């Protein structure tokens, strides 16, 4: 949690802002009127994890730039990555579990606390859109496995094989040893001779998490993945878990996670970050506090793991932090369209 002194300082700033302007809501709690005006000039804005976020952000921007809702934007954006087929960690082309089956996880959350999730769904290209339908058409939050697939098929989705030749080749190579060790970036070491598969390389990514703030000042988020390569049958990480891999509170902001999901789940990472922002922490500091908590609880294990967090608040301020060097995120707004490196606990 934020330190008491910082909390009191932020609280006093909020009181001063309210007294000076009569502003209500979260914006007044942690920003001056001048800061609010400056930040809103950067709205709409969309953020997403890793380098494939650049293409995904463009898809989201098509919605945001026309005044569309944040939740529509994030769905449209991550669908691009799900169908890309050239990465090994999301959607079509994702590496399979240890039985050779590609299972996908995804969740989505809107500005009204609506949320939907699918876990271990197979043969469906766009799990994020199935998660959206779970949110909008069922009384549930989560559907899993065969039930999730049945729901998708009943709503017009088509079955298709998601195991690409590249992923199948990597799987057959893995079968020679069948060694499984959930260390950082295991998915990206299919070709260990290539620096592109190492931390910081162009293939160094897993989950795509995306958060957007639309022209109306509302937030939406999405997260989708094929999970850890060669995982145990039925394993689910943080990506489809509301509060762990993704959380949105339209009064405060949103956060998403990437990396070894078990560690994110243990601290309910994205929800923790949003609550830290509610108490006055800036997005990057909130992400850092979450990383610090992971390291404090498992200091020896954390040295070999990667977890990255990405967050935005209602002012359009954003930030990220990770355990290991190499995590990056993409930002698109009226004023920028670029990648940013995430600061890390450990350095090279």
Image (cartoon, rainbow, N blue to C red):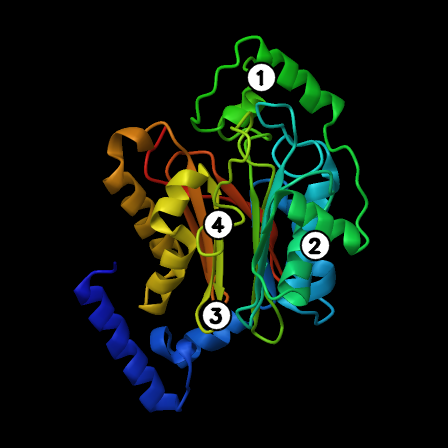
Determine whether label 2 and label 4 are within 8 Å by CB. Answer: no
Tell me which label, 4 or 1, sits earlier in the chain: 1
Q: Mark 4 points at which residue?
A: 245
Picture coordinates of residue 303, whole percent (x, y): 32, 29
Label 4's element? loop
Question: Image quadrant of residue 8?
Answer: bottom left
Tell me which label, 4 or 3, sits earlier in the chain: 4
Tag in front: 2 or 1: 2
Q: How far apart are marks 2 and 4 (CA)?
A: 17 Å
Q: How far apart are marks 4 and 1 (CA)?
A: 29 Å
Tell me which label, 2 or 4, sits earlier in the chain: 2
Q: Name the residue under label 3.
A: 314
Q: Is residue 55 visible in the rendered structure shown here?
A: no
Tag in front: 4 or 1: 4
Tell me which label, 1 or 3, sits earlier in the chain: 1
Question: Image quadrant of residue 131?
Answer: bottom right
């Amino acid at each position: 949690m934020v330190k008491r002194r910082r909390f009191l300082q932020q609280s006093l700033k909020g009181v001063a802002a309210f007294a000076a302007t009569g502003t209500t809501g979260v914006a007044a709690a942690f920003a001056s009127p001048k800061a609010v005006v400056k930040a809103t000039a950067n709205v709409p804005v969309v953020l997403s994890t890793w380098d494939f976020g650049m293409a995904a952000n463009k898809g989201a921007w098509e919605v945001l730039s026309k005044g569309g809702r944040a939740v529509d934007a994030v769905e449209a954006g991550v669908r691009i990555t799900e169908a890309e087929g050239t990465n090994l960690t999301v959607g079509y082309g994702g590496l399979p579990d240890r039985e050779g089956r590609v299972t996908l996880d995804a969740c989505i959350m809107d500005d009204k606390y609506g949320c939907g999730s699918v876990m271990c769904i197979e043969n469906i290209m766009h799990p994020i859109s199935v998660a959206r339908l779970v949110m909008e058409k069922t009384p549930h939050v989560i559907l899993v496995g065969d039930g999730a697939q049945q729901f998708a098929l009943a709503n017009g989705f088509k079955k298709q094989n998601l195991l690409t030749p590249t992923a199948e080749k990597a799987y057959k190579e893995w079968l020679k040893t069948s060694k499984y060790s959930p260390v950082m970036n295991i998915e990206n070491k299919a070709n260990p001779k290539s620096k592109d598969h190492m931390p910081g390389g162009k293939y160094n990514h897993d989950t795509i998490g995306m958060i957007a703030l639309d022209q109306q000042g509302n937030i939406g988020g999405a997260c989708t993945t094929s999970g850890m390569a060669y995982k145990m049958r039925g394993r689910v990480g943080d990506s489809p878990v509301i509060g762990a891999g993704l959380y949105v509170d339209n009064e405060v902001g949103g956060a998403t996670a990437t990396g070894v999901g078990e560690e994110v789940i243990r601290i309910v990472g994205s929800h923790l970050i949003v609550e830290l922002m509610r108490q006055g922490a800036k997005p990057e500091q909130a992400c850092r506090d979450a990383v610090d908590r992971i390291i404090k609880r498992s200091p020896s294990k954390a040295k070999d793991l990667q977890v990255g967090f990405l967050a935005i608040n209602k002012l359009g301020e954003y930030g990220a932090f990770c355990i290991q060097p190499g995590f990056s995120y993409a930002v698109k707004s009226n004023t920028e369209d670029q990648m940013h490196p995430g600061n890390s606990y450990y350095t090279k």
